[in-house]
Structures are given as C-alpha cells and as structure tokens.
Amino acid sequence: MDAKTLCLGLLSFGDASGYDLKKHAESAGDHFFAAGFGSIYPALSTLLNQGLIEPTAKSSGGRQDRKIYRITAAGRSELIRMLSMDEPRHLLRSDLFALLYFSHLVTPERITQVIDERLAAMASELAATRNPDSPLKHPHPASARFVAGLKSALFETTIQYFRENRALLDH
Amino acid sequence: MDAKTLCLGLLSFGDASGYDLKKHAESAGDHFFAAGFGSIYPALSTLLNQGLIEPTAKSSGGRQDRKIYRITAAGRSELIRMLSMDEPRHLLRSDLFALLYFSHLVTPERITQVIDERLAAMASELAATRNPDSPLKHPHPASARFVAGLKSALFETTIQYFRENRALLDH
DNA sequence: GACAAAGTATATCGGATCGATATAAAATTG
DNA sequence: CAATTTTATATCGATCCGATATACTTTGTC
C-alpha cells in the first residue's frame, strides 16, 4: 500500500500529524504496514496539494510546530476509490530467510546467532502483544484485534518451526 | 537484502544469466526474497564494473543474446562479508491486512472477495508446494526444504486463522 | 534550579527498488 | 507455416526507505 493511501486511511480515524500517523501505523500494524518519515511527509504534502487533506486550526495553547491534518470529503471518496481498486498484495520478505538459503557461505556460529536473535525478538514481541500497555486506543478494536491476532499466530508458528527444523541447516 | 547481494548469492551456486537468477529466486524463495528485472540488471552491471562477477564464454551453439555471468574470487569474499555484516531483517508487509484494518470504509462484499481470493491463492500455492513439478534442482536441498517448509507452515496458519476469525470483520 | 538526556516533531537528500514498458529472438502450438 | 508463448535484456519514472539535520519540550536527577 502506498504511503498516500495509508495516510488517508489513518486520517479517516481522526485528525493527526505526520508524527501521529507513524506512531499509529507502528502500533496498529507493524510488520504488516508501516511507513517512514521519508514517505509520510512527502505523501502529506502531495495530499495537501491535491485537496485531499487540509490543515486544521492548531490548538492555541499547544506547541507551534505541530501540523495537524484533517481528511476532506474529496479525500474520503478518493480513499474509498483506492481501497476498492487496489488488488491487495501479500508479501513476506525476509533477509533472514535469504541468509539461511545461503547458509553454506557463513559460519555455523553466525547461523546460530541470527536465528537465536530472531527467536528472542519474536518471543519478546509476543509477550508485548499479550500485555498490551499501548497508550493508543484503536478506533476499530475488532480490526486491530484481528491483525494483532494474526501476527501472534504467525510468530508462534515461526518459532515452533525453527525449534523443530533448525537442525536441517546444520552443516 | 539488496539486489547485489542476492545476485551474488545465487551466482555462488553456479553461472547464470539475469533471467536465470530471477527464475531461481522465484522458485526458491518467492515471498521471502525476490527481485524484478529492474533491480537485477542494474545490479549485475554494477557487480561487473566492480569486478565481483565476470562474463563467461557464451556457449557456442546457443543463442547469442544470453549473457552468462560467473562470480569471481573477489565477489565470493565480498559476498561472505556482506552476509556476515547485514543485520537480517524480517518483514511481513501486506496490503491485504492494511485493507482489512480500514474495512469500515469498504463494502462487506469487497472484504469477502479479497479474503476469498487470498485463501484460494494460498491454497493453490500450498498444493503446488506439495506436488513440486519444478524443473529447478536446488543446489542446497536442505536450505530449500527449510524455506519451503516454513512458507507452507505460515500459509496453513494464515488459512486457519482466516477461517476461525474472519467473522470479527463483519460489520 | 541547572543541566543532561530522552522524546517529540518536521523535513530533505541520495540511493535503491519496483512496475511498466519496449524490443526481439526462439520455441511451441494449432 | 502462422500465431502465440516463452525466453531474454534493458531502461525509465515514480516511489520508497534509511540516514541525516534541526530544534523544541519534557523528564530526570544531582
């Protein structure tokens, strides 16, 4: 999904700054959808020029440098059009698995190291998902739970698969 | 993993053309690593300029326009260096899940359609994995089986998760 | 209260990547 | 033997990402 659609979609939940959008995307769908500042700010700039979003009156007492945007009516219909048009893709890209495919070129110690690191990272993310201390309230809890649950299921499968099959990579 | 490392890694299994490299990557690690022609050909050109690969004598009787490359000694050590240095990332990016996160904006029919399409695509890929009629012999069968097995496990988990939880998205 | 550290926030740049497209020869199929 | 598909290289523009620069605000702590 391109950054423009993602920004519009997140703005459909409520007004936000570029910084807010990045935090929301990370909290909601990290690993499934995300964008860096280098994508978000140019996207917001384009959307603004196209009249799909508009700046809001900044909260008077707040800080001066926050730029809060609101989706316009044109933006909302364009968003719906893009969401209906796109053939949504589903990609799993992993440098780790690519590295394992070339495992004949690296030392067994390195293989052990990168696998253990990945297992630890996934386990800690699973724990964080089970104890959600996230300050962000998802606007659509059902969708958020659906996506988070799938992430957990995939992580659990991956961890189990590594435990059962990593011996295949011994050489 | 950048295209240069991927090309070098695949060339470490044997001489190949750009076209061969793309086919190999698709067959071996589609969904986990891949590259389009727009990445492969520029990468090969750069690697050639850096002396990390070299052209081979084209097979005399064959077609004239195939350009077969071989990894050089410098290329092999550079490859090993890159594989040892990279902190391998592990990304799951899915436009489908992003769309589902915005499911309040699209019709239930559209949700049903995209989920059913994805389920069918994964089921057919699973069937293809179980009946491998691939003409390509993977140079390292253990690594290839490891990666293919993980893909199957992840697809099965995803299919099951959709079956059990898609009702969460009804609205 | 002074000062450092961490967090918040916007923005840009260059390199990398991807999808679309152009071209054309060889193999296959009807 | 004509039409289609597959093989094969290559480039272009749009986009994307990571790194970086900048600067203000909050927090913590001595």
Image: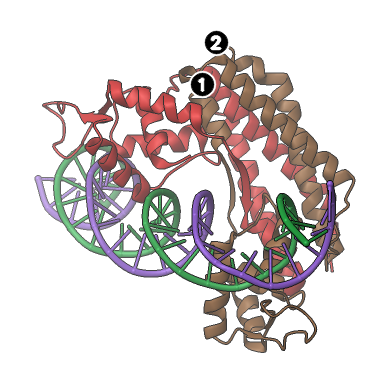
Chain colours: A red, B brown, C purple, D green
Is A84 positioned to the left or the right of A113 in the image? left
Is D21 positioned to the left or the right of A125 in the image? left
Could you tell me residue B161's position as x and y percent?
71, 26
Is A61 positioned to the left or the right of B100 in the image? left
Please report the residue visible at 79 percent of the width from the left and 45 percent of the height from the top.
A161
Could you tell me residue D24's position as x and y percent?
14, 45
Could you tell me residue B151's position as x and y percent?
75, 46
Above or below, comparing residue B63 to residue C13 in the picture: below
Q: Quadrant of residue A80?
A: top left
Near mark 2 (Cα within 10 A), the count class, few <14, some 14-19 or many ≥20, is few
Residue under label 2? B171
Would residue B84 be visible to someone looking at this image?
no
Please report the residue visible at 66 percent of the width from the left and 86 percent of the height from the top.
B72
Chain for mark 2?
Answer: B
Near mark 1 (Cα within 10 A), the count class, few <14, some 14-19 or many ≥20, is many
Q: Are marks 2 and 1 in contact (CB under 8 Å)?
A: yes
The foreground one among C10 and B55 is B55
The secondary element bearing badge 1 is classed as helix
The secondary element bearing badge 2 is classed as loop
Residue under label 1? B103
The foreground one among A35 and B50 is B50
Above or below, comparing residue B70 to residue A127 in the picture: below
Could you tell me residue D14's position as x and y percent?
37, 51
Please check whether the numbered discs 2 and 1 fall on a single chain: yes
Disc nearer the start of the sequence (2/1): 1
Q: Quadrant of the C terminus of chain A?
A: bottom right
Which amino acid, mark 2?
A: His
Chain for mark 1?
Answer: B
Would residue B146 be visible to someone looking at this image?
yes
Q: Which mark is residue B112?
A: none
